[in-house]
Image (tube, grey):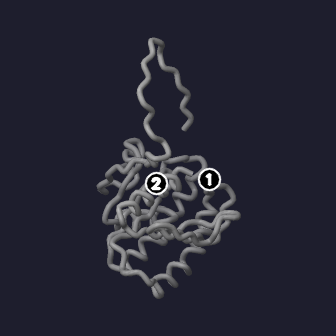
Amino acid sequence: GGGGTACRAIAIEMARRGWHVEILTAAFKHLPRRVVGDNIVMHRVRCLRADAGQCRPYEMVSWVVSALPWRLLRSVTWSMPRPDAVMSFHSIPSGRAGAPLARWWGVPHIVRFGGGDVPGWLPGELAGYHRLSNSINQRIVRGAAAVLANSEGLKEMARRAFPGVRIDILCNAINPNEFPPASPRKTDRPVRFVFAG
């Protein structure tokens, strides 16, 4: 989905700059449980997620339940130096694992909204989930050192849900090596294009 794509692009850029990045995410079908790359380590924990591009409320809860034991184990056995920060892509469910880790290490917790974690986003599908998780979500967001949204529209929606919280924007990212700009072409006819997003 969008959060995974943005997280991937940001992680690759951070790693390219020499930062060490560790990612905790959901296991999905045949994907390996642990992946090690140049300055990036990805850990996938089991959960009930069935679709790559969508995560239902019960799947989110299953991820939190799976991530909690992993989080506690890693807190005790972490082999790398203390991280400089913990970033949660989505306040819920990811912040449920990220906020306690940040507290354990005494480092800043950064929350990046992606849509479904903001009350008002998909109100028909997620209204019940937002009602049940509101107090936890409020604590995660209000306790964060920085809160980010991926667009102006999401920022405004989040400001209504979390009044008084400063929210900055970190747009979804792409890898410019995968989508290089084309060289300009001279033409007398209008340019037509199709966009799917």
Residue 65 pos. (x, y %):
59, 74
Residue at the (46%, 54%) spot, across then down: 9
Q: Which residue is mark 1?
A: 54
| Quarter assignment of residue 34 | bottom right
Q: Distance of mark 1 from mark 2, alpha carbons?
A: 19 Å
Residues 39 and 27: in front is 39
In the image: residue 164, left or right of residue 133 = left
Q: Which residue is mark 2?
A: 9
Residue at the (37%, 45%) spot, across then down: 156
Q: Residues within 10 Å of mark 1 (few under 14, many from 20)?
A: few
Q: Residues within 10 Å of mark 2 (few under 14, many from 20)?
A: some
**Quarter the C terminus occupies:** top right
Residues 107 and 154: in front is 107
Cβ atoms at labels 1 and 2 below 8 Å apart: no
Of mark 1 and mark 2, the one earlier in the sequence is 2
Residue 8 pos. (x, y %):
49, 57
In the image: residue 49, left or right of residue 41 = right
Amino acid on which disc 2 is placed: Ala
Secondary element at image label 2 = helix
Amino acid on which disc 1 is placed: Gln
| Quarter assignment of residue 60 | bottom right
